[in-house]
Amino acid sequence: MNHQELYKLLVTVQKNVRCPQCGKQYNFASIQIRGVVDSIVFLELNCVNHMPLLATVTLSKQSKQKQIHKDNVKPDDVIETYRLLKDWQQPLSELFKDNK
């Protein structure tokens, strides 16, 4: 999963997922990636007035296969992305500023 795909996923979640208690739309900065395992992305969505929502998003097998063949992801790419996201302290929108 590259930065653009991750950004598109987060934008889709932000537009389509709402707080189950108050129905308020999550702002982009309140969505945090907690982990990625295979094709599953674990997210934490924080509502100002309610408990956080933990969600999983499963990427389609087809898009995952296309990405692997297209970009030839190397182990160093995964390690570098993990290190970047692990210590990232700013809103995720800042990470993708150049990709818009």
Image: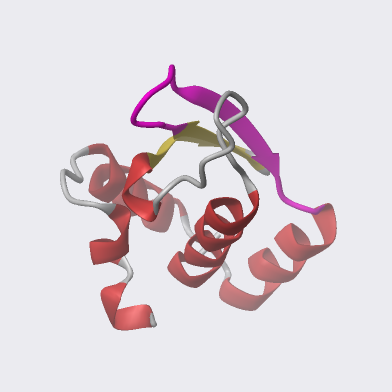
Across and down, in percent, residue 70 comes to: 65, 77
Q: In which quarter of the image is residue 48?
A: top left
Residue 56 covered by magenta stretch: yes
The one nearer the camera, 53 or 79, is 53
Q: In this view, does 49 lie above or below 59?
A: above
Across and down, in percent, residue 82 comes to: 34, 44
Q: Is residue 65 above or below residue 38?
A: below
- For the record, the magenta segment spans 45-60
Task: Quarter of the image for the N terminus: give it.
Answer: bottom right
The one nearer the camera, 23 or 57, is 23
Q: How many labels does the image show?
A: 0
Residue farthest top in this picture? 51
Question: Residue sitting at 75 percent across and 64 percent down?
Answer: 63
Across and down, in percent, residue 86 comes to: 26, 38
Q: Quadrant of residue 9?
A: bottom right
The reply, left or right, for residue 55 in relation to residue 60 is left
Question: Residue sitting at 72 percent across and 50 percent down?
Answer: 59
